[in-house]
Image (tube, helix red, strand yellow):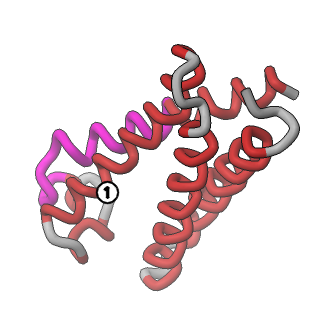
Amino acid sequence: MNIALWIVAGVLAVAFLGAGLMKLAQPREKLVESGMGWAGDFSPGAVKAIGALEVLGALGLILPAVFDVATVLVPLAAVGLALTMVGAIVVHARRKETPMVAVNVVLLALAVFVAWGRFGDYSF
């Protein structure tokens, strides 16, 4: 089970690191043009904050465990990313963006799996 948790945490970290860095690096208008219509509903600062939270969550899934320092941050990061996905589901559902809701549900399930595993019997 430990290997499965590492794999899922790694996949989540890559996904959220990429998504977060994209939100941090590109202006809101460019994100909207590239298909992220939801970004137009938020201020540029809010989009950057979401990106920063995603990057921090991605780092929190991996770095504490790799360096064996404050490993309780791993499940806490997973919970934070799960809450972020709940917010994303609400936003995409209101905009009737069903494919994005499905992606967010999968990411939510993976984050909950990591949180469950690392808070439970498979903690570090």
For the N terminus, give its image quadrant: top right
Magenta range is 14-30
When asked about the image quadrant of residue 38, the answer is bottom left
Magenta portion: prevailing SS class: helix
Query: Mark 1 highlights which residue?
Result: 50
Asked if residue 65 is among those painted magenta in the image, a careful observer would answer no
Of 27 and 8, the residue lying toward us: 8
Residue 107 x, y percent position in the rendering: 62, 51
Q: Is residue 83 above or below residue 95?
A: above
Q: How many marks?
A: 1
Q: Is residue 39 left or right of residue 14?
A: left
Residue 49 x, y percent position in the rendering: 25, 56
Q: Is residue 91 left or right of residue 105?
A: left
Q: Is residue 115 above or below residue 82?
A: above
Q: What kind of residue is marked 1?
A: Ile
Q: Is residue 25 left or right of residue 96?
A: left
Asked if residue 29 is among those painted magenta in the image, a careful observer would answer yes
